[in-house]
């Protein structure tokens, strides 16, 4: 159950950008592992998993914090609860070293979503509110760039 939840969460949050990457499996595994770890601290309810299947994040602190946990552990978000463009660039350099096309898309994604750092949030460096904004931006941009198929 948890394993499935992790896969679903990963798919919704990230795979749109990196589908078909050469090292997709490797990156996917890292995300699944991190999500599973974070879902132990912030366990999703079955209803919340259902929502995620539809690429929607439940409006619960628990789910938002689960994504904050995940984004922080991957380096996409820094300790201050801000989107880290550098962290996203590092990920893309690491996993798409030989794939300029994917690197470009990752950069465009980071650039398109970094504006969530300008939004005022109530929970500061916990980053849960901002993680929800990043989730939303990720889903929207994935659709906009036509990267989900
Ligand atoms: C990105 O990588 C550089 C070089 O390895 C490192 O110094 C820096 O701390 C990394 N930044 C983040 C946010 O992961």
Image: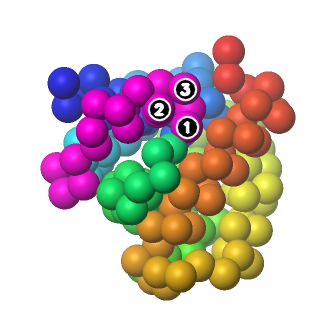
Q: How crowded is mark 3: few (under 14 residues within 10 Å), some or many (20 or more)?
A: few
SS at circle 2:
helix
Instruction: Tell me: residue 14, above or below residue 87.
Output: above
Quick check: 47 left or right of 81? left
Residue topped by disc 3: 54
Asked if marks 1 and 3 touch (Cβ < 8 Å), the reply is yes
Which residue is drawn at the image coordinates 45% and 67% (left, top)?
128
Residues under labels 1 and 3: Cα distance? 5 Å
SS at circle 1:
loop
Bounds of the magenta span?
A: 40-56
Asked if marks 3 and 2 touch (Cβ < 8 Å), the reply is yes
Q: In which quarter of the image is the C terminus?
A: top right
Residues under labels 3 and 2: Cα distance? 5 Å
| Residue 56 tag number | 1
Asked if marks 2 and 1 touch (Cβ < 8 Å), the reply is yes
SS at circle 3:
loop
């Amino acid at each position: 159950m948890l394993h499935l939840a992790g896969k679903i969460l990963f798919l919704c949050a990230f795979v749109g950008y990196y589908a078909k990457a050469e090292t997709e499996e490797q990156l996917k595994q890292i995300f699944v592992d991190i999500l599973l770890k974070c879902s132990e601290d912030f366990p999703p309810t079955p209803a919340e998993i259902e929502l995620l299947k539809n690429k929607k994040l439940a409006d619960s602190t628990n789910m938002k914090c689960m994504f904050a946990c995940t984004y922080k552990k991957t380096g996409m978000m820094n300790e201050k609860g801000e989107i880290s463009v550098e962290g996203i660039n590092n990920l893309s350099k690491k996993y798409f070293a030989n794939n300029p096309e994917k690197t470009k898309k990752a950069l465009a994604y980071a650039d398109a979503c970094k504006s969530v750092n300008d939004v005022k949030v109530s929970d500061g460096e916990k980053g849960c509110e901002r993680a929800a904004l990043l989730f939303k931006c990720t889903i929207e941009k994935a659709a906009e760039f036509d990267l989900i198929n």
